Image (tube, helix red, strand yellow):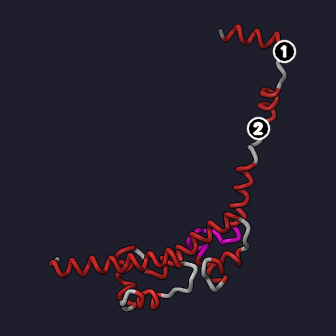
Amino acid sequence: MGTAATDQHLRDLALLRRVRDRIDREYAQPLDVEALARGVHLSAGHLSREFRRAYGEPPYQYLMTRRIERAMALLRRGDLSVTEVCFAVGCSSLGSFSTRFAELVGVPPSTYRERAAQAAEAARTPPEMPSCVTRQVTRPVRNREARAVGARLA
């Protein structure tokens, strides 16, 4: 690559980083590839090709991935409905959001939310011990038994 080509490549990478940073910052806003391309004075087709080459996925897919990641965090929090989360992350169609969420996460958003709530509850509740262990651990120890155990350990 010549110096001019190298310089152009570096300028293109800087523009692509600006687009990626804008997506990361404004994921909840109505963004489309044309608007992103206009913001860096590129055609939508060129932006899509170069973005995919640099980051492994086209800009719209990257945007949806960011939205789904944020949706996962909101669903784990548990205080918003799936519909509220859908609109909070910038999606305008619950059906499209649910389909994309299931594609990326492997389960629909409602299932993800339920599992996250169950996991949070399980983390708050100590696991149950088997009754035989509970009896052994909570069994009262008489002084005579305590001395005998202490003598054997010494």
Disc 2, SS: loop
Q: In the picture, residue 21 is in which quadrant?
A: bottom left
Residue corresponding to mark 1: 142
Q: State the separation of the CA atoms marked 2 and 1.
A: 23 Å
- Position above or below: 75 against 95: above
Where's residue 47, x and y in %?
38, 85
Q: Is residue 71 magenta?
A: no
Q: Residue 132 versus residue 33: which sits nearer the camera?
A: 33
Question: Which is more N-terminal, label 1 or label 2?
Answer: 2
Residue corresponding to mark 2: 129
Circle 1: residue type: Arg
Where's residue 54, x and y in %?
35, 75
**Residue at 62% across, 71% down:** 71
- Position above or below: 44 against 133: below
Q: In the picture, residue 115 is in which quadrant?
A: bottom right
Q: Is residue 106 magenta?
A: yes
| Of the two numbered discs 2 and 1 in the rendering, the one whose residue sits closer to the viewer | 1
Where's residue 73, x and y in %?
62, 66
Dominant SS of magenta comes to helix
Q: What's the magenta region?
A: 101-111
**Residue at 17% across, 77% down:** 1
Disc 1, SS: loop
Circle 2: residue type: Met
